[in-house]
Image (cartoon, grey):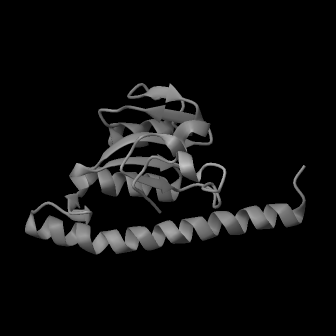
Amino acid sequence: MSTPNSMATHLLLLLENQLILVDLLAEMLPLVEECSSQQKPCSMSMGKTISDQRFVIQGFGNVGAWAAQLISEQGGKIVAVSDITGAIKNSNGIDIPSLLKHANEHKGVKGFHGGDPIDPKSILVEDCDILIPAALGGVINRENADDIKSQIHY
């Protein structure tokens, strides 16, 4: 059973991680809006556009789902997603509108037929260009940092 202190610490870590992701999304939003208004590809990292990037999102709650939606709308390919119910992978890209509908109806990503189920523990080491850890803070640590394949992780 969790103690009040461990629950408070857990909540603070969660809020800290979500604030970081909100900041990331806030940084991305003007770029997305500018690209949308000019109808041109968005440049994100290393001279690539969002649509040139493969993303993995660990955590599909409010922050992860919004990140997925914004990335998907700009043509980014989300190849793996996890939440508390499970994890899925589709190297051709996950249909995010369908996943959002499924997650809302089934309270999670588990059972989504647009991807293959994978071990949720492997989500951080899935091959991608950009990893977005949108669940708990501290998931990237010295034990797993060398195994992470993404070029960028927020």
- Residue 24 placed where, x, y %? 42, 69
- Residue 87 placed where, x, y %? 53, 35
- Residue 147 placed where, x, y %? 54, 45
Nearer-the-camera pick, 153 or 34: 153
Residue 56 left/right relative to 38 = right
Residue at image position (34%, 33%) is: 91
93 shown above or below 29 = above
Residue 57 left/right relative to 136 = left
- Residue 53 placed where, x, y %? 28, 50
Residue 57 left/right relative to 8 = left
Nearer-the-camera pick, 67 or 54: 54
Nearer-the-camera pick, 79 or 148: 148
125 shown above or below 110 = below
- Answer with the quarter of the image where residue 90 lies: top left
Residue at image position (51%, 48%) is: 148
Q: Visible in this render: residue 123? A: yes
- Answer with the quarter of the image where residue 77 lies: top left
